Amino acid sequence: MKTILKYMITCTIILLTNNCFAQNVHFIKNGIIEFEKRSNMYALIKKKINKNNESYMQQAFDNYKKNNPQFKAAKSTLRFNADKAVYKFEDESTPTTNNWLYNNPIADLKNIIATDFKTETSTIQKSVYEATYLVKDSVRKINWKITDETRDIAGYECRRANAIIMDSVYVVAYYCNQIAVSGGPESFTGLPGMILGLALPHDNITWFATKITEVTVPEKELLPPAKGKPIDNAGLKKILIAVFKDEGEYAQPYLKAFML
């Protein structure tokens, strides 16, 4: 009888402790997250080298490594509240270089993405060479697989989730449920918390939060972009396929980048 009573008291203490802890957890629903996007240019360039072009590409790659860093970095921010978010790159400048290997479609993406969490829609301003499109559509539906792996990002504990998008793009995300908004960098959403870390391992690109500031974001900073030719994802894909129809396998990185 004493053993049972002792067990019941212990369980009660644990439940009360957990309840108090849950009540004291502060959930963030407004703020600004600063991200750093890092692109492994050495890996991206190396993928372009094959038996048909190695006679000149390998030498160009070797020269590139002598004068350029391995990683190309870009700063971006995600401003958000419980209902909306806007993701954009803060530094619009492009490093001056005469090396054509430095340019890469997925590394150079600088989309502006406005997400409406209530309507589950997004407005994305995309630059495709000289053209600017305003892609309005539903948010991408991602079939996330949540794991038990965790890591600290910018002082917040995050849990790992994996997914495949666009049939073949492997995605690893780390989300924080203490930031109670289902958003993230670029057009990645759909987890039970904010994505603070994102990686496309096979494409050598990562996005990681470097600073989170809890602050009320003015509504004017959450307005969607307005510049560009209105279109939806299906329409943009049709245009891209027509543009790259004669490029064969060389078109795939560009199609992937512009549809990301």
Image (cartoon, rainbow, N blue to C red):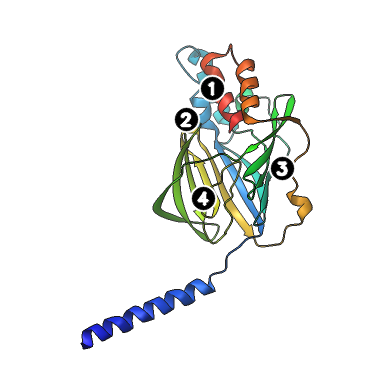
- The residue positioned 46% from the left and 17% from the top of the image is 50
Instruction: Find disc 4 in the rendering and name its residue.
Output: 191
- Residue 107 rendering spot, x and y as whole percentages: 60, 33
Residue at x 74%, y 24% (from the top left corner): 130
Q: Residue furthest front?
A: 119
Query: Residue type at mark 3?
Result: Asp
Mark 1 and mark 2 residues within 8 Å of each other at the beta carbon = no
Would you call the spot at circle 2 few (<14 residues within 10 Å), some (14-19), or many (20 or more)? few
Q: Amino acid at mark 1?
A: Gln
**Is label 4 in a helix, a strand or a loop?**
loop
With respect to residue 26, does 157 lie above or below? above
- Of marks 1 and 2, which one's residue comes earlier in the chain? 2
Q: Which mark is residue 167?
A: 2
Which secondary structure lies at badge 2? loop
Q: CA distance from mark 1 to mark 2?
A: 13 Å
Which of labels 3 and 4 is toward the front?
4
User: Is tag 3's residue or tag 4's residue first in the polypeptide sequence?
Assistant: 3
Q: Nearer the viewer, residue 247 or 189?
A: 189
Q: CA distance from mark 4 to mark 1?
A: 28 Å
**Relative to 227, is 235 above or below?**
above
- Say whether residue 20 is left or right of residue 88: left
In the image, taking residue 150 as reference, residue 180 lies left or right, namely: right
Q: Residue at x 67, y 50 (%)?
A: 85
Residue 116: x and y, percent? 66, 47
